[in-house]
Amino acid sequence: MSASRKDIENRVIPFWDEAILPTLTEYIRIPNQSPGFDKEWRKNGHMAKAVELVRRWVEAQQVPGLTLRVLEDGGRTPLLLCDIPGDLKNEVLIYGHLDKQPPMTGWRKHLGPWKPVYEKGKLYGRGGADDGYSIFAAIAVVKMMKSLGLPHGHIRILIECSEESGSSDLPHYLSAYAKAIGKPELVVCLDSGCGDYARLWSTTSLRGIVSATVRVKILREGVHSGMAGGIVPNPIQIMRMLLERLEDPGTGRLRPEALHVEIPPARIEQAKRAAAVLGGAVTEAFPLVKGGRALAGSPQQLLLNGTWEPAMTVISQSGLPELGAGGNVLLPEVAFRLSLRIPPTLSPREASDTLRKLLEQDPPFGAQVSVSAGGQPGWNAPEESPWLAEATDAASREFFGHPSCYFGIGGSIPFMDMIGKKFPKAQFLITGVLGPNSNAHGPNEFLHVPYAKKLTCCLMRVLEAHYFHHHG
């Protein structure tokens, strides 16, 4: 190795403290919600402000040889593309995104989505961990490698601004700028998670997602609940009956076998190993109320439930008045928005068709039931090359003092399916900082800064190993 662990840490840690955290703090203040949540994102200008903040910061780093393009084709969300020529033609693509989830309620009194607070190594605020940090960490990796004379391949950094809306604008950019993006042999995605903060984690699979709106109508207009109650079925009663077609309310298991797949043996073994590392932390990572319990199952089974089994969540509704605002009325109709996480290898079209047939056929009490659904596929990693497995494990042991670990993630990253199909022979390191209690998408989201620093160091070693794998 051309640089010691101490050499790397002595560069990376101060750079995070002095150069990254002040600007990342300013980024958190910007309410640059993804277009799916801010329909007036162009008019409001928050996305443009976030992009400009990052653009100025990247250019201020004066990374030798780096060129930065900000693409905004046809009114689409921006895409930032950094190009850093390397010592070889072997190509690397590093991915992240700048758009954010909506603010959500429930933030602790002294915190807020657009109010950055740094406490005990954690930077609170929306988007710091998911995943505004990614462009800063990626630039830090390249800048520190160059400053230490560490060799690397041809690196490109791609940062999009529509990931939280299903990466709706990304296919255009991947096609229109294919030459500029290159043909990466190694793809590093920084939008994933970690099972704990004690080692480098690599994501091996991602569930897909199907978003569905289920509408139930039983009356042409609302009627007096005292007159109709006991005679006319309540639309919530009908909705409950429909959801029980889909989900076993006692176990949470989705009933249709068409929504399940055979889990690959290698993924079962990885879940077993990850469960041995995490143990009770599999459930302790979630903020259950006092006395609250998770679903039944061993740590291994729960990991598989959250990564390879389908699951349903009701995420919003219409038709119900706010608490205290409703009269004594039997409502005519309601609609629920469902989020279905589907197995990594299941087609979202097949899952959507299954859902429509299940809920629309033979509606209870002859109600009018309609389902509109669509989604994004998941991703299952190709077989890992020995050099990458050795590099990630060695980096984890060097900077964390523990071996690396592999697991699946229950969330979705649309980019992975797109890039996986485009470059089927590429190797993938899918990692990130979304660990226990970091609560991306929810209240009190935080970036675990010590972990982000060590992750930055690990990525330097992996890119160095990538060079030597090809250079000998």
Image (tube, helix red, strand yellow):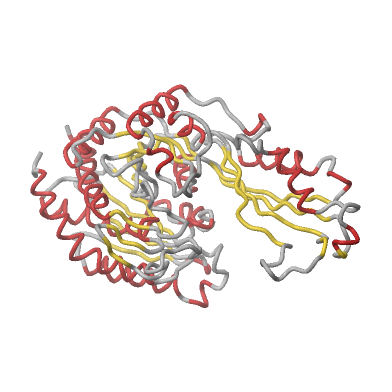
Give the tally of numbered discs: 0
Asked whether, in this view, residue 104 is left or right of residue 254, the answer is left
The residue closer to the viewer here, 415 or 438, is 438
Quarter in which the N terminus is drawn: top left
Work out which quarter of the rendered image holds the C terminus and state it: top left
Query: Which residue is drawn at the image coordinates 36% and 47% (left, top)?
Result: 435
Residue 356 x/y as whole percent: 74, 43
Residue extending farthest front: 291
Q: Residue furthest top?
A: 265
Residue located at (41% from left, 31% from top) = 382
**Position of residue 159 in the picture relative to residue 348 (left or right):** left
Report x, y in % for residue 189: 37, 47
Q: Residue at x 24, y 45 (%)?
A: 459
Q: Is residue 41 above or below residue 180?
A: below
Residue shown at 42% from the left, 65% from the top: 71
Quarter-wise, where is residue 471 in the image? Answer: top left
Along the line of sight, the residue nearer the viewer: 330 or 54: 330
Residue 130 pos. (x, y %): 40, 56
Residue 288, percent across and down? Answer: 47, 47
Quarter of the figure with residue 385: top left
